[in-house]
Amino acid sequence: MFDCGADGTMMGMMGPGGMMAGGGMMVFWILLTLALFALAVLGIWALIVWLRNNRTAASTSPQGGPNRAREALDERYARGDLSIEEYRERREALGG
C-alpha cells in the first residue's frame, strides 16, 4: 500500500508526497459533496413550501370558496350531522 521512495519518504496511493498531496483534493470533494447535498435538501424544502402555498392560495381564492363549502358539507355528512336528504339538498344548492 505504501512504498518508500528513494529518499526514504512515504509515497501513498495518491502520488509523491504521501497522503498530503491528495488530502487537499479529498477535502475539496467532501465539501463539494456536502454542498450539493445541502443544495438538494434546500431545493426539496423550497418545493414543499411552494406546493403548500399554492394549495393554500387555491383554497382561499374566490374560486376555492365553493370547494371549501363542499368539503365542509361532506365532513358534516360523514360525521352524521346531516341526513342523506339534507346532504343532497345542500349539495344541489352549492351547484354540485
Image: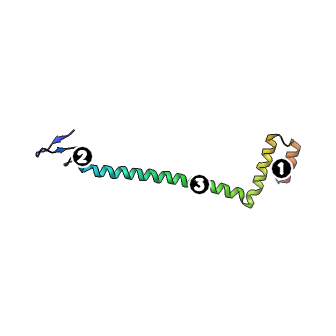
Please tell me whether mark 2 sits on a helix, a strand or a loop. helix
Q: Is residue 39 left or right of residue 53?
A: left
Q: Residue furthest top?
A: 1
Q: Quadrant of residue 79?
A: top right
Badge number at residue 19:
2
Type of residue at label 2?
Answer: Met
- State left or right for residue 44 relative to residue 19: right
Which residue lies under the disc numbered 3?
Answer: 49
Spatial CA distance of label 3 from label 1 is 33 Å
Query: How many residues crowd mark 2 within 10 Å: few (<14), some (14–19), many (20+)?
Result: some
Q: Which x, y percent locates residue 58?
A: 69, 57
| Left or right of 81, for residue 16 | left
Name the disc covering residue 91, or none.
1
Count of numbered tags: 3
- The Cα–Cα distance between marks 1 and 2, rounded to whole angstroms, is 74 Å
Question: What residue sits 53% from the left and 51% below the top?
Answer: 44
The outermost residue toward the bottom is 62
Marks 1 and 2, the one that precedes in the sequence: 2
Disc 3 crowd, CA 10 A, few/some/many (<14, 14-19, 20+): few
At mark 3, the secondary structure is helix
Looking at the rendered structure, the kind of residue marked 1 is: Arg
Placement of 75 over or under 56, stated as above or below? above
CB under 8 Å between discs 3 and 1: no
Which of pointers 1 and 2 indicates the residue nearer the eye?
Answer: 2
Mark closest to the chain's N terminus, 3 or 1:
3
